[in-house]
Amino acid sequence: MKILVTGGAGYIGSHTCVELLEAGHQVLVLDNLTNSKLDNLEKVSQVVNIKLDINEAKACDFSFIKGDVRDKKLLIRIFSSYTIDGVIHFAGLKAVGESVEKPIKYYNNNVVGSVVLIEVMKKFDCKTFVFSSSATVYGEPHTVPIKENFPLSASNPYGQSKLIVENFLRDIFVSDDGWHIALLRYFNPIGAHESGLIGDNPNGIPNNLMPYISKVAIGKLKELSIFGNDYDTHDGTGVRDYIHVVDLAKGHVKALSALESNPQVLVLNLGTGTGYSVLDLVKTFEQVTNKKISYRIKSRRVGDIAECYADPALAKDKIGWEAEKNLEKMCFDTWNFQLNNQTD
């Protein structure tokens, strides 16, 4: 299949490109590079030993176009030039804290971008769509682990933007039941490809926990900020379901395959089913790397919740997927990536 991967130069997108290419799919990446680097895709090409084309060659197995998913004219040109069999949609802003400060930016990018993309896909009768959603659509769950049928109520603009798009996609299916749609609700992806070539390497100061920890360990940042130690958890810090990014990427390939069989809206949690606190993660990282992580406790952030981890049973049942890599492996691969990318 020829798969358009929006936001494919980003952290999860680049790892998913690896898994798609290794599964035999052709991949066309659309990314505006606002929080990613073209170098990530060059490294993907090294991992899979497939040349990356940036000249829009029609027959290339792996190609890149720089552009914004909200650019309707560009999308029309892409769908006119290529026969796209399906889309995996990663393009979006993802920092919870920033979304509280800049909600207009998040709704514009995440919601408007998705609407424009679906509109163009419909025009060209491309109806296979895998959406990068989030566990934030559950808001503050009353119990854990979280099942897919739990009430939905996001507690911040980032989560709201994901929930709006989910509801939009359900409405699209109601209006036309020929669509093949997967809503994949991620928990907390960390880790890196075992090659050490690609990992979580955002532009500027990291918004996510693991790259921040690794940059403290390598000496690029002074200390880690831990937001809140008074939650109702075993050590007072927030508990999350950390999943290896490669496991997560494989989930997209499995979902894509499952969608081929019949039109549907497939809603799945992608997580491990185990919750670890911020301090659990810090201690495991220290044990794996033999590096001391300095940290400072700060007040809670607006929009954060105490505890969030998945019941991943449905993904195993519906698409034959389950996470395989443990927390030690996630920390080891993160550190390996950091050591291999010290100049970034």
Image (cartoon, rainbow, N blue to C red):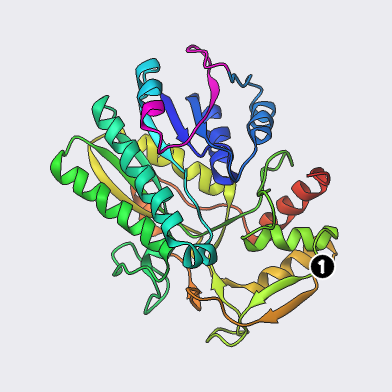
Q: Would you say residue 66 sits in the magenta stretch?
A: yes
In the image, what residue occupies the spot 15% across and 38% down?
A: 176
Q: Can residue 54 be seen by looking at this rendering?
A: yes
* Residue 227 occupies quadrant: bottom right
Position of residue 205 relative to residue 151, above or below, is above
Q: Which residue is outermost to the left? A: 175
Numbered marks: total: 1
At label 1, counting other C-alpha atoms closer than 10 Å, the crowd grade (few under 14, some 14-19, many 20 or more) is few
> Residue 202 location in percent, x, y?
65, 49
Q: Would you say residue 195 sits in the magenta stretch?
A: no
In the image, what residue occupies the spot 50% across and 52% down?
A: 93
Residue 116 vs residue 284, the one in the foreground: 116
Local SS, label 1 = loop
Q: Would you say 274 lies left or right of 279 here?
A: left
> Residue 226 location in percent, x, y?
66, 75
- Figure quadrant of the N terminus: top left
Give, as a three-letter code, the residue at label 1: Lys
> Residue 241 location in percent, x, y?
53, 65
In the image, what residue occupies the spot 19% across and 49% down?
A: 171
Q: Would you say 299 lies left or right of 133 here?
A: right
Position of residue 118 relative to residue 219, above or below, is above
Residue 18 vs residue 155, the one in the foreground: 155
Q: Which residue has dot 1 on it? A: 222
- Figure quadrant of the C terminus: top right
Q: Would you say 257 lies left or right of 277 here?
A: left
In the image, what residue occupies the spot 65% across and 26% down?
A: 45
Q: Which residues are magenta?
A: 55-75
Q: Would you say 188 lies left or right of 181 here?
A: right
> Residue 51 location in percent, x, y?
63, 19
Residue 327 vs residue 96, the one in the foreground: 96
